[in-house]
Image: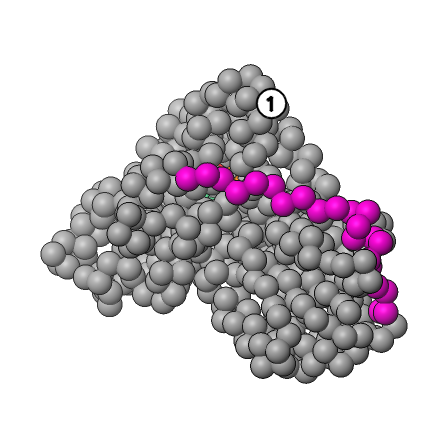
Amino acid sequence: STTVIWFRRDLRLHDHTALSKALESLTDEDQVVGLFYIQPGLNQTFTPRHDYYYETLMKHVENCEEVGFPIHFITGSLEEAFNQVVNQLPDVDQVYFNVDEAGAGAKRDQKVVDFFEEKSIPIFPCVDHTIHGANEVKKPDEQHYKVFSSYYKQWLKQDKPRLQHVDLNKLKHHALDIRDQFKRGQNAYDKLMEQKTGKWQYAGEKHGLKRLEDFAESKVDDYQKKRDFPALSATSMLSPYLRTGAVSARTVYHWIEDEKGDRSQTQGMETFVQELAWRDFYNMIYKQYPKSKDEELIEKYRGMDWGDDQQLLEAWKEGRTGFPLIDAAIKQLHQIGWMHNRLRMAVASFLTKDLLIDWREGERYFEECLIDYEAASNIGGWQWASSTGTDAAPYFRIFNPTRQSERFDPEGTFIKKYLPELKDVPKKYIHSPETMPDEIQKEAGCVIGKDYPKPIVDHKLQRKKALELYKERG
Ligand code: FAD
């Protein structure tokens, strides 16, 4: 009989719950098949996130091939595709996969579970994407936490899941290759591969694990001190790997724990582990509040009178606001599909509280541009910044974009990297280039209003308006 392992956003061979559990369950005669479902029409939506994902998928398919475990592709409607699995694989008797606990993925997973249950084929959804699943960290009365600090206390106390070892020899030994029977799926895969740009050469499990190793060895100790300064590249940049599952969250956690054992705990390690817990927290919140992509968690902020100035929105999206840190952050997003956390907070605060534009516009724009787009964390981040989420920044906490720039990019190094038009602007003016006297503008080769825009809003004025907008709601 045949065991099926369905891959999705868990594109790796290390520490993999579904694979590990499936292998444990095999008897000598059993065969195992690696499966990937390609939704039709997928190649019509092509964002950097898709491009990055396909690159990761290709690396995963290659890695699986290398260890003698070929991946089979299916396509068509969900039902058509999984019917193919049942009809074309010899005697399917169980299916393992790592489940999405929230969002659109969770709905799709449920359909697949129903499909196999109807056919009386056991299917095992495994919780794997987070360190603790959405139902694992609860109050003593079984209620879910709403505030991160109490959640985190409990999160820290709970035993952490062990790594889920994958026996690659066993995998190879049981692997079945009948790819010639899955030609339609294979063609769909080949099309995706033709579409990808190939620019994300550092995608995939091998590079992800190397990045983790480098970060754990040489950067994590200073994480607490340096993580807020975008010019320093002091954060792990593991988010795209966690998003695609090329690296597992458990592996990241245990790697850091092992470092603690080897050379004692540092503040950097402690703060870093706390960030992993934020990821778990938002996954739990998204599962609890499935409407939160469209609806404010705090009821009184629903239906607020957001502005709809399209010119302001376009200027924000294109990095033409006249606030250098905000513009440089957006350019970073465009260039590398990733933005530093401090900047995500700053640009989100700017959109909602300086431009008074609905946070949903920002959430969706990030979805279009980020390679690490994770609905739970992105919604969590946007609702935090717009003060509408659970445990969010209070509404009167409004980032001053110029002050953020002075504090977190004091030399203007980050700004100059992403805004070359400001590269010769003296440090004194880099955070507010519009204050440069005319002769200095000429010397710097940067005429304000021509080479770089004037600020599109007056922060002080907008701040007042934002406070009124929120205060109206009591
Ligand atoms: P590190 O600082 O090295 O942290 C390690 C890991 O911890 C990250 O890879 C991430 O998985 C997790 N993490 C860190 N901070 C957070 C956080 N605040 N919330 C949840 N998880 C966190 N993160 C995403 O993964 N996808 C998103 O779509 C996303 N959108 C965001 C939108 C806004 C408005 C804000 C304010 C934050 C968002 N974040 C998102 C969280 C955070 O900015 C990124 O996880 C982080 O910048 C990724 O870089 P890193 O891997 O170097 O992080």
Q: Where does the image place residue 61, in percent across and percent down from the top left?
A: 77, 56
Viewer-closest of 224 and 466: 224
Q: Where does the image place residue 299, in percent across and percent down from the top left?
A: 22, 63
Secondary structure, mark 1, is: helix
| 178 part of magenta stretch | yes
What residue type is disc 1 on?
Ser
Rendered position, 463 above or below 50: above
Q: Which residue is mark 1?
A: 218
Residue at 58% of width from left, 77% of height from top?
Answer: 117
Mark 1 Cα within 10 Å, few/some/many (few <14, many 20+)? few
Q: Where does the image place residue 107, in percent across and percent down from the top left?
A: 50, 71
In the figure, is residue 38 to the left or right of 29? left
Residue lying furthest right: 180
Viewer-closest of 402 and 434: 402
Viewer-closest of 106 and 126: 126
Residue lying furthest top: 263
Residue at 24% of width from left, 42% of height from top?
Answer: 397
In the figure, is residue 122 to the left or right of 321? right
By secondary structure, the bulk of the magenta-drawn segment is best described as loop
Q: Is residue 18 visible?
A: yes
Q: Is residue 152 visible?
A: no
The range drawn in magenta is 158-179
Asked where in the image residue 293 lies, by quadrant, the reply is bottom left
Residue at 69% of width from left, 62% of height from top?
Answer: 5
* Quadrant where the N terminus is found in the figure: bottom right
In the figure, is residue 316 to the left or right of 181? left
| 328 part of magenta stretch | no
Q: Where does the image place residue 435, in percent across and percent down from the top left?
A: 35, 33
